[in-house]
Amino acid sequence: MARNKAKENVYSVILFLLLYGVTEAIASAGLYYLGEKRNVFYQPADTLSEKHQEKITELIEGKTQYYQWSSTLGWTIQPNGSSRLFQANSAGFRGDRNYPLKPPDNILRITSFGDSFTHGAEVKNHETWQATMEKSSGYEVLNFGVGAFGLDQAYLRYQKDGKQYESQVVLIGFMVENIYRHINTFRPFYFPQTGFPLGKPRFILEGGELLEIPNALPTQAHYQKLLQRPQSVLAEVGAHDRYYNRRYKSSLIDWSPTVRLVRILIQEFSDGDRQTWVSLNQIYHPESEAFQVTTAIFDRFYQEVQDNGSIPIIIIFPRWHDVQDYRTTDNRSYQPLLDRFAAQGYRYIDLMDLFADEELDLSKIFLTEYGHNSALGNQMIAERILDYLKDLQEAETLELSLNRSPRPSIPLG
């Protein structure tokens, strides 16, 4: 009897080990699929991937050709930086030539700030909408856009680098996904696949007041410490980061493929494009932290531009699938933001209106489904902005605003 019991126990152990082995093998296959097909990897928020470690080392040692780390902005463009498509001038913003701080007489100067859609990612310098505007109009259109920026960083770049270039018009670029970036202090917390594994500043609201939380990784020494002790440093950096506080952290049982797969799937399904746990599936809900911080930054940015004697105009950049959704549902996910602009009397151009026509082939306007605007898309954007400026001139709005500037009024025609 005892012998039979022992055999049963042995069989149970063998069966358990077989089931465990099969489960781990299936989980390993699932992890491989997610990595190869969806570019999703197991990466706890309190760890650095090998790629991120290599990129951080490259950035802090100055081995990059176009972008560089910035103590205040997180990252920015190198003076005279260059890459296969991009060329920066000696002042560190995209352009084939340098500009004096003060524009020449009788030349309208426009400066632009924003992320990669403002910068013109994936097209050459002469194909950006700023360069197209310059060529078509004779205006000066300066491109201060930086890839992966949020509106928070764009505003700080205006303060740090842009406002000294006396411009009559300031274009504030905003791609609709940017709202997610405003509750983030270390880009990989939000977007683990990023090529910018760097810290960034963010703003918070306290008692209705917009306060800046400076970049928590402002020096090479901070990054060296991060590389040496990532877990403790990332915990400090993530103190004000919504994504860090929601994402899974490393554990003692991470050796198990099943554990890693389950944790990834829980994150993915609860994440829902990061909206579920950011603001109950409504990132643009007026009561969400991201929305309130974003609108407060817009208020500060817009007002400061006006105080400096320039005309602010907000440019809204939709993505490919934003346009597709609008064509299908006639709804804009960011409509609450537009409503607020209207209530505040802000000037804005929503490029959704430019791309909404179903006869337009989106594959001609965007380079890929998840990519940026093509050369044709940039040309269309340039023409739309020029038309808007012409409308302002005809309505005398632009001329009246220019009369409040410390510089002489300059006609657009």
Image: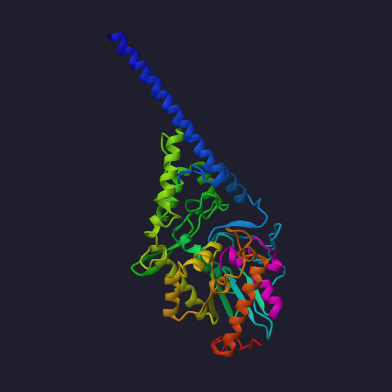
Whether residue 316 can be seen here: yes
Rendered location of residue 268, percent (x, y): 44, 48
Q: Is residue 128 magenta?
A: yes
60 or 125: nearer the viewer = 125
The quadrant holding residue 210 is bottom left
Q: Looking at the magenta stretch, what is its main secondary structure? A: helix
Residue at coordinates 49% horizontally, 73% vertically from top-left?
301
Rendered location of residue 30, percent (x, y): 50, 38
Left or right relative to 97: residue 395 = left
353 or 241: nearer the viewer = 353
Rendered location of residue 394, percent (x, y): 59, 90
- Display coloring: rainbow
Q: Is residue 361 above or below residue 194?
A: below
The quadrant holding residue 353 is bottom right
Q: Is residue 221 above or below residue 400?
A: above
Q: Is residue 10 above or below residue 355?
A: above
Q: Is residue 24 above or below residue 290?
A: above
User: Which residue ends up furthest to the left in the rendered image?
Assistant: 1
Whether residue 166 can be seen here: no
Q: Which residues are magenta?
A: 114-138
In the rendered view of the protein, which quadrant contains the N terminus?
top left
284 or 143: nearer the viewer = 284
Q: Is residue 250 magenta?
A: no
Rendered location of residue 377, percent (x, y): 64, 68
Residue at coordinates 59% horizontally, 72% vertically from top-left?
112
In the rendered view of the protein, which quadrant contains the C terminus?
bottom right
Total count of labels: 0
Residue at coordinates 47% horizontally, 72% vertically from top-left?
298
Left or right relative to 255: residue 78 = right
133 or 156: nearer the viewer = 133
